[in-house]
Amino acid sequence: LRQDPDIIMVGEIRDLETAQIGVKAALTGHLVLSTLHTNDAPSTVDRLINMGLEPFLLTSSINLIVAQRLVRKICAGCKAPVEVSPDALINIGVDPAEVSMGFPTFKGKGCPACNLTGYKGRVALYEVMVMHEPLKELIIRGASAADLKREAVKLGMSTLRMSAIKKVREGLTTIEETVRVTDSDKGFGSVFSLSI
């Protein structure tokens, strides 16, 4: 902080001391970027509180939380339409109205270009939670990550699952990848931005 940086990058927050340093820098007007391993964006708040940070410090210092995951991309060389039952689509979260209008799904058959896997490359899923006032109030009141997620969705956040469904709709990934990546409790990455 003595060098008066505009932006500070903290590699990863693993303990209370690192979290406190990040919050202190944010409270003094610096933009602080860091990473933290959580399942989704709202879980970041729980994780930081469980480390020992006070909720009022979080609401004063966090502007934005982004969770991300990578899903395998369908190989363009062998991509073909596949039939998926309407019930299966609805069960993963596709809007029933969209299912009734026809929801295209694709899968790679496997070819030399993708080593017979049906996938080539990856595409990112994002969950961006902007810290609006209603979310800050919930944090101060000690709301759960599930409550924060519900409110964030009401305020316009797309969950990782919603992001994955969009990628399925665009023909970039499969239903199987959507379920594999967004149903897991492990391995989600979360990036958050602290600033005043």
Image: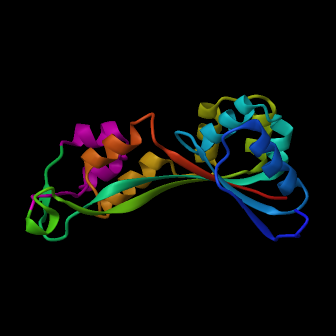
Residue 57 position in % (x across, y down): 85, 42
Residue 128 position in % (x across, y down): 59, 55
- Residue at 79% across / 48% down in the picture? 133
Horizontal side of 96 relative to 32 (left or right) equals left
Answer whether residue 96 is visible to the viewer in this image: no
Residue interval drawn in magenta: 85-110
- Residue at 62% across / 33% down in the picture? 145
Residue 3 position in % (x across, y down): 88, 70
- Give the quadrant of residue 20: top right
Horizontal side of 84 relative to 190 (left or right) equals left
- Give the quadrant of residue 59: top right
Horizontal side of 31 relative to 168 (left or right) equals right
Does the magenta run of residues contain 112? no
- Location of the C terminus (image quadrant): bottom right
- Residue at 8% across / 67% down in the picture? 112
**Who is closer to the viewer here, 179 or 20?**
20
